[in-house]
Image (spheres, rainbow, N blue to C red):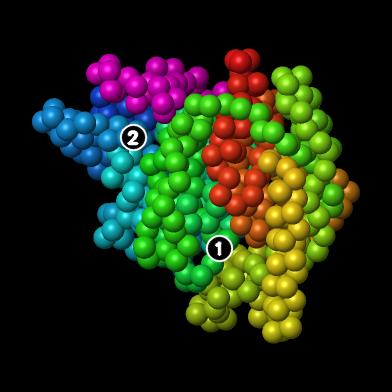
Amino acid sequence: MSDASGLAPSTGIVALSAVEAIAEIRKGHLSPLEVVDAAIGRIEATDAGINAIPVRCFEAARSEARRLMEKNAAGEDWPLLCGLPLAVKDNTDVLGVPTSGGSALTAGRVPDVSNPTIDRLQRNGAIVVGKSNLSELGGANTTNALFGATRNPFFPALTSGGSSGGSAAALAARQVFLGHGNDVGGSLRTPAAFCGVAGLRPTPGLVPRKPLSDPFDTVFVEGPMARTIPDLALMLDAMSGFHAPDLVSREQPASFQNAAARPSWAGRIAVSWDLGLLPVDQNIRSGFRGAIDRLQRAGCAMSETAPDIAGLPGVIRALRGLAYLATWGRLWPQSRDRFTPEVAGDIAHGESLSARDIASAMERRAAIYRRMQGFFSEFDILICPTTQVAPFPVEIMWPAEIDGTQCESYIDWIMITYVWSILGCPALAVPAGHDRAGMPVSLQIVGPPHSEERLISFAARVEQAFSGRS
């Protein structure tokens, strides 16, 4: 941790990676209860300054750890995750733990079943120690009226990003070993970048999703967050698989842990600083340039180019407005004053769209998708920055300008992640060292739909390059 964090250094059990902790449990050197107790101790010691885990279920976690130990003592093998402590984003149901969504509109419900992704993780041996903080009703900065803001563990005056900022901050502070998140416009990747951890937005259908108001949606996904690529691959193995009620669900294609164990440069790599049209802060450009230079020195050959996505930001604004109107229309306009200004603006924009506006947005997205497919027939992977700006003061909801360009909307600063969401591409935020100010640098590694194995193998090679290992 940076001295700016004010956090006690992490030592002992919480300093282990998820993969290392599991190995110690399997060898009998640690028990799930010891690991859970270590995570609880770390949360109690550090969370007052971060506010990553506002909802806690410590005694239930200890009980589950004891249950796993009793089953192992009776002759059962350890499950895949061996009782590792997990933080679950607080818009997702965990049996017996209140779900808030960070809003008075959705708070107060105690579910009697976990959502499919969490149920799968629990059956594979994850132990939920708490619910992580999030943006209110889907914003891009982790703050809400119920629990307040989550701060960046490295620089507490700055934001952790959103909307899965609580999980990212908890991971970076070593409060948990794995973090759950979900992603519409960058909610897994932006906070991962700001907090110096890894976050994967998978292809829709790989990870079963919670029940959605629109089951035909292909933008909302669930995904893993972790401190290392092998940890992320392990978690993806534990949460992937077919779930019949999810319309786009499919079988897990292979072991992602095996992909992480085979680090490799991809054959044809493209790189772009701004996707040809987005404003990017000069500090982000500088950190990105330094990271790319390091990869090239490590033997990664790449070409500077990007797919033609002209017109996509306008498509995103239209389809986001439509989706938010569909999701929240039943509470609109009678509860208008209970929405954040940003989400209220999305809903109002959705109301303003004509049928021709919607048809035009759908037609333009289809054309850009076809151009994207053509691009990925020539390149295996594209590398671009994960964010357009560096972490900003926690009190600011969103930056007003980027590199001299005024932001018209609160989603303008996450367009570099949103474009891949709207096109259905998997995208992985990978830590890539730090810039001169000590801020984490993050590379966004993007591939065509269903290319997660390739992304994870490549990301593992990137991780090696920045760790000094070969």
What are the residue bounds of the magenta stretch? 1-30
User: Residue drawn 24% across and 34% down?
Assistant: 65
Q: Is residue 48 above or below residue 145?
A: above
User: Residue drawn 47% across and 37% down?
Assistant: 256
Residue nearest the viewer, comparing 399 with 337: 399
Q: CA distance from mark 1 to mark 2?
A: 28 Å
Residue nearest the viewer, comparing 304 with 33: 304
Mark 1: which secondary structure? Answer: loop
Spot occupied by residue 22 in the image (x, y as percentages of width and height) = 34, 26
Q: Which mark is residue 98?
A: none
Mark 2 highlights which residue?
81
Q: Is residue 111 above or below residue 33?
A: below
Q: Residues within 10 Å of mark 1 (few under 14, many from 20)?
A: some
Quarter assignment of residue 469: top right
469 vs 371, left or right, is left
User: Residue drawn 73% across and 36% down?
Assistant: 269
Spot occupied by residue 134 in the image (x, y as percentages of width and height) = 52, 51
As shown in the figure, which amino acid type bears the numbered disc 1?
A: Thr
User: Residue drawn 76% across and 39% down?
Assistant: 270
As shown in the figure, which amino acid type bears the numbered disc 2?
A: Leu
Q: Tell me, yes or no, whether the highlighted magenta stretch contains residue 26.
A: yes
Mark 1 highlights which residue?
218
Q: Tell me, yes or no, whether the highlighted magenta stretch contains residue 205.
A: no
Q: Please indicate, yes or no, whether residue 49 appears anywhere in the rendered image.
A: no
Q: Please indicate, yes or no, whether residue 137 appears anywhere in the rendered image.
A: yes
Q: Of callouts 1 and 2, which one flags the residue occurring earlier in the amino acid sequence?
A: 2
Q: Is residue 387 above or below residue 332?
A: above
